[in-house]
Image: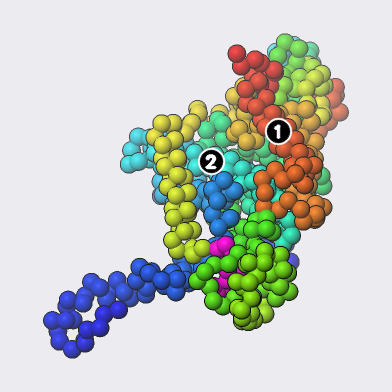
Amino acid sequence: MSDQTPARPANFLTELPTNIWQSIFRNPVPQSDRDRSATSFTNFFLHVQPVKVHRHSLRLTYTWGLGLMAFFLFLILAVTGVLLMFYYVPSTTQAYDRMLDLRGTVAFGVFLRNMHRWAAHGMVAVVFLHLCRVFLTGAYKKPREFNWIVGVVLFLLTMFLSFTGYLLPWDQLAFWAITVGTSIASYAPVFGKDIKFLLLGDSSVGQEALLRFYVLHVAVLPLLMSLLLAVHFWRVRKDGGLSRPPEEDEVFPAAEVSVVTATAAPQEAAAVALAVPATFKQALAPKLYGIQGIVRGPFTKIGNVPDRSVFSWPNLLIAELLVFLVTVAGVLIVSLYFNAPLEEPVNIMHPPNPAKAPWYFLGLQEMVSYSAFWGGVGIPTLEVLALLLVPYLDRKPDGIGKWFARERLLANSLFLTFVVINIVLMVVGTFFRGPNWEFVSPW
Amino acid sequence: LVAAFSNLVFIKPRATYGLPNRFSIGKPGDYPSGSRLTLEARRICVVRDGDKMAAISTTCTHLGCIVAVSETGFACPCHGSHYDQDGNVTGGPAPKNLPWFQVRLAPNGELEVDKDVEIEPGTYYDV
């Protein structure tokens, strides 16, 4: 803050750049803990995050930054997607030409399309890996059951966003993948045919379908996704931050702490006090326990609680910046070296042989080649239902916050089996299927 | 709830803009006896055997790909379903036989196929 007296016009001018800056950023670069917390909660973009974050949540080897990475990929997709919208026309006669224009006349057209395509592939993969991380660390258990469900729905939305985007280039790959995909939907019981008709707006893939997929892809699904992302993030904080093993919450004495405030559950703090060794107890003994507010549930503690948390500024921000840089760098490098494929324009007379879906749907397509109903509808529905019900079936509180915890051997083995089966199906569909979906050797 | 339902009603089109399901395929004389001609845009195969004519669907009953005419009947390039000359499934994941559509002579002397009317496979129209 400046302590100049605002009287003379000369001062008025010399103040100029500073007072604008200060009106935007109320806090100077923080020097004290008070400033650090103020920086977090007076900034619109930073106040999404807690003021303090547990050390365990910052461990790279615990989260691998996968959730953040998925979010950053979504941001990249939103930005590149909006830019591509300036040149795209959802019309069967123009869409393909517009794809060629991206190559020929639009500045950075190819590069933006590459970024959009590879970030989309990356997002499907990263969201799935994030789901695996959460399962293998038992993070979906109480109190985070509902956030797991929101996460599974976000995963399905990611797949559906990718599927709707697949039609837009209007090339052979797009047309036949959507023909096959929507036919799979028509195998759903009772409403199957109606779902297909509503999706396509006609009896087969054509102009109506292109327009519908476009609207879903650029408006409906991204809005839903943003809404659920907000709920997902909000719940992370309201459920007490990222999951961690209970022993991480044990109090250890910090020299500078003079007052201990137990905000969440006084009896819990007392129990913890009993558990700490005698010397620590002595150090804690003269301290005053005051209840600053009675809050139910697993909320993050506020104040100088002697726990293992650190200030979000700068610790969390640096970690986030790192993940952001890695994500952007990855997408840029891949987009520089590999071009997004564009096949022949749509020819509704001749399906390519074999007609393959994108890699993450090839497991489905492989199952569909055995039975359309069970492969395309039955088994996927059961898998999704199983995923949604997991936190309500597996309720033992053991092994939360640890990778491959011994206590969770059965659950983790079952989950990994499910993952491996799906990956094997994908590999078979990708490399071992040739014309007429007959078995071929890739060598 | 009413709003959600009315949205569903709204997005269900009352008119479609694609190819019509009832269309003319030309005069019977265009199809010599013993021929099997596929009309790719219409997704049918017109079969003529002497004076008997029929229209068999070439849309795979599995997942809607277009089946190609093969030596033994029809074969689907997408997931490997096979059908015999009459459209009966002989292999692959296809759950149903290829449907046969109604063929009739219109008053102007041209043949008319109606894909909304499926007929018993093996039923021919005498021209």
Q: Is residue B34 above or below residue A325?
A: above
Q: How many marks?
A: 2
Mark sitting earlier along the chain (1/2):
2
Q: Which mark is residue A122?
A: 2
Mark 1 burial class by Cα count in 10 Å: few <14, some 14-19, many 20+ = few
Establish if A66 lies above or below B4: above
Q: Which residues are magenta?
A: A298-309
Q: Chain of mark 2?
A: A
Q: Position of residue A117 (x, y in %)?
A: 49, 39
Residue A377 placed where, x, y %?
Answer: 76, 40
Please name the residue shown 57% across and 43% down the image.
A126
Q: Nearer the viewer, residue B1 or A271?
A: A271
Q: Can residue A211 be seen in this snapshot?
A: no
- Residue type at mark 1? Val
Q: Nearer the viewer, residue B110 or A7?
A: A7
Depth check, mark 1 against mark 2: the one in front is 1
Q: Is residue A423 left or right of residue A348?
A: right
- State the SS at label 1: helix
The image quadrant of residue B95 is: top right
Quadrant where the image shows the N terminus of chain B: bottom right
Please give the label number shown on residue A420: 1
* Relative depth, front residue between A229 and A320: A320
Q: How is the image coloured?
A: rainbow
Relative to A359, A333 lies left or right: left
